[in-house]
Amino acid sequence: MSLTRRGLLGAGAAAAAGTGLAALGFPGPAVADSDTQCAGLIPAVAEAPPGGRIDLHAHHIPPVYREALLQAGMVTIGGYPTPVWSPERAIAFMDSFGIQLQVVSLSDPGVSFLSGAAAKTLARQVNEYTAELIKDHPTRFGGYAVLPLPDVEGSLEELAYALDVLKLDGVALLTSYGGTNIALPQFEPLWAEINRRKAFVFMHPAALPADDKPSYGLPDFLVEFTFETTRFCAVALNTALTTRYPDLRIQLAHAGGAFPFLNYRVGVMQDGAANQVLKDPDSVNGVLPAAQQRGFYYDTALNPAPSAMQSVLEISDINHIVFGSDWPFTELLFVVPGDPQPPLSATFATSQRHAIERANPLAQLPSVAARLGVPAADTAVDAKLVRARVIKQKAGKRQVRFLLDAGETVLVDAQLTRAGKMLAETRFSRVDRGRRSLRFTLPPDLRPGKARLVLSVTDVFGNIRTVRTSIHVID
């Protein structure tokens, strides 16, 4: 009997379904085989970046929180059975999938199923538990604060305590509370304070009250969550939230839901210039996010497939994509140890994945980087492309020559791609700083003035690994 990835996935899903979704009347999770998953694109397993992945979308369920849920008669979260969680199980998961650290938060409903003093007390208990978790495992866990929303005054008090006293890494918010979108004016004082502090926000979808949503027999996490995130983005743009508070940085769960696809439509009532996706020759995909959307970051949790990632790349750049697992709610998806999200490799080169999985998250959370002993990302001197030109060779061959200035960084590798396909790759075998010349032979079918070549250069400063990209039209 041979053990295949397909067989292991099927066995794991079947075993779990009897105690999970099936017990609630839902079928077990559909297990896509290698002929169907991601439209037939199952890339090779990718190695973790040096130092390990940083997971910005992961959840914890402290004992005090689980007890509060049970007392309220809540046995599911987002329509999914409340999973088992412990620090030891989380660390075992991380070790199996090349993850160095998880920044944990409560999932929906946060503490909003309580009100008044009870909600404030539970928020304080959870935040103090999270701080102790980080203290006990400083290189394995980070944490986002939970706030007793919709109580804005109480939330401002808890935000100050969580960030100033407990030193948590950011704050987790839900897209709505009791059906009221978090981007609406009644939450303005909270946004003003978050902007003043330049605190990082993890935006997680919430389940709408039963009377406010259609009934179609599917759990909220499957469909409704994605549209809750979309609604938040639409309201935020149409109330100019991110314009009034330009220092907001907001991580959107699940690749932003349907927002990347609906990006143009949700902005048609607003200033066209503010919502226009710009061209940027230094971006891997030639895109600079629109001014109002520059503070949006998109995590890969439950949406690493090319259809989702390509949509994100239509409106943003790789620096705005961060790794997320959504564990333990996605536990059934993680059966074979190794690469947690193989579909990412259908969209991104290895060096680009490494940026998404480590450098980008650390750049947004310097407190996490400091606990790991990683220099702040902004202390590095960027590698810059000085110039690129084509050199004609004998026998009709042409080469393109790139001149790089690495500054104080160390060059690791360089990749040349065209329409997402690798043309050539160079790995630097020694410590390369300063100026460096690269030459790549061009394919014979390259049409001058038409083909767009993407050069991706990976460099390292301290323990921060960064991917620099530029786009070139060859004459």
Image: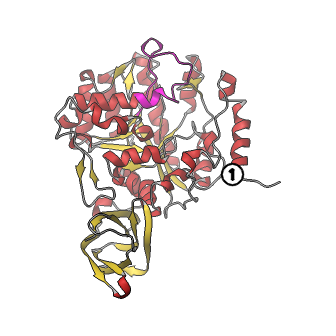
Percent of width and height locating residue 456 = 36, 66
Q: Does the magenta stretch include residue 196?
A: no
Residue at the location (64% across, 36% down)? 30
Q: In terms of image quadrants, where is residue 212?
A: top left
Percent of width and height locating residue 302 = 51, 40
Residue denoted by label 1: 5
Location of the N terminus by quadrant is bottom right
Residue 209 appears left or right of 365: right
Residue 34 appears left or right of 216: right
Q: In terms of image quadrants, where is residue 355?
A: bottom left
Evaluate whether residue 248 shows in this view: yes
Location of the C terminus by quadrant is bottom left
Percent of width and height locating residue 224 = 47, 26
Q: Nearer the viewer, residue 4 or 229?
A: 4
Q: Which residue is at the far top? A: 211
Q: Does the magenta stretch include residue 211?
A: yes
Q: Which of 21 and 360 is in front in this view?
A: 21
Q: Nearer the viewer, residue 133 or 81?
A: 81
Percent of width and height locating residue 394 = 35, 88
Evaluate whether residue 56 shows in this view: no
* Mark 1, secondary structure of its residue: helix
Q: Give the range drawn in magenta.
A: 204-227
Q: Looking at the image, what colour scheme do you see?
A: secondary structure
Residue 304 appears left or right of 34: left
